[in-house]
Image: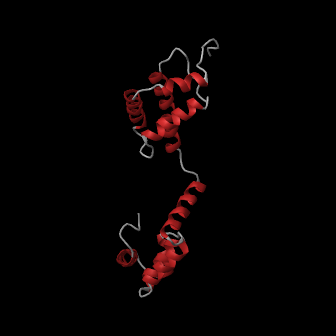
Amino acid sequence: MEDDVEHLSLLEVGRLLGRQRQADLLRLAALAETWVRGNPRRQASDLLNEALARVLAGDRPWPASLSLHAFLSQVMRSIASQWRHEDMREPLVADQLSQHCDAAMEDGFDLADLAHRMRAALSGDPVATGIFDHIMTQTSRKQACDALGLDATGYDTARRRMTRALRRRFKPGWTK
């Protein structure tokens, strides 16, 4: 590490950022657009704001030898890289449960209510209802066939019938 590198004070950083012209700000926005590519869940404005927040908070000291655009480009590159690593990590089970709960709450019903309404839609077909119950309990296809007394063809036929009935009853895309 270089201990003798001189850094700008927060007052100097604020003064330099405050003197930027429109053209300079557009150049920074273009740099943010460049670095945010490959992060589909993130926006360039968020990247630029995060970089500025870190610089102004003193989390990223600004070496006096670097220009504004070069320094902020390095900061944005670092943040974008961090975001890519966060987005690539395998989601934790708690994250997945939270997302499922949020989605169910947004739609105005919970999973139990949805399952109840799906069973009601299949009430006229006991084999399709049985297959639905086995899918919900995550039993194997063989176990479902044995419990319902079906062969492979009968299972496939009943499952297609169940899927068609649910698609007719619920809006398209519910299986995604």
Q: In which quarter of the image is residue 6?
A: top right
Residue 62: quarter of image: top right
Toward the viewer: 103 or 71? 71
Residue 84, image x, y percentages = 48, 39
Measuring from the top left, give residue 8's x and y in whole percent. Answer: 58, 19
Residue located 35% across and 77% down the image: 168
Closer to the camera in the image, 136 or 109? 109
Residues 145 and 91: in front is 91
Look at the image and name its color scheme: secondary structure
**Above or below for 54 versus 8:** below
On screen, residue 35 versus residue 14, left or right, reads left
Residue at screen point 37% across, 28% down: 23
Q: Which residue is rendered at x = 48% and y = 31% of the image?
A: 76
- Depth check, front residue: 109 or 167: 109
* Quarter containing the N terminus: top right
Quarter that holds the C terminus: bottom left
Q: Is residue 116 above or below residue 76?
A: below
Task: Judge whether 63 appears above or below 146 on screen.
Answer: above
Q: Where is residue 133 in the image (x, y as percent from the top left)?
A: 51, 77
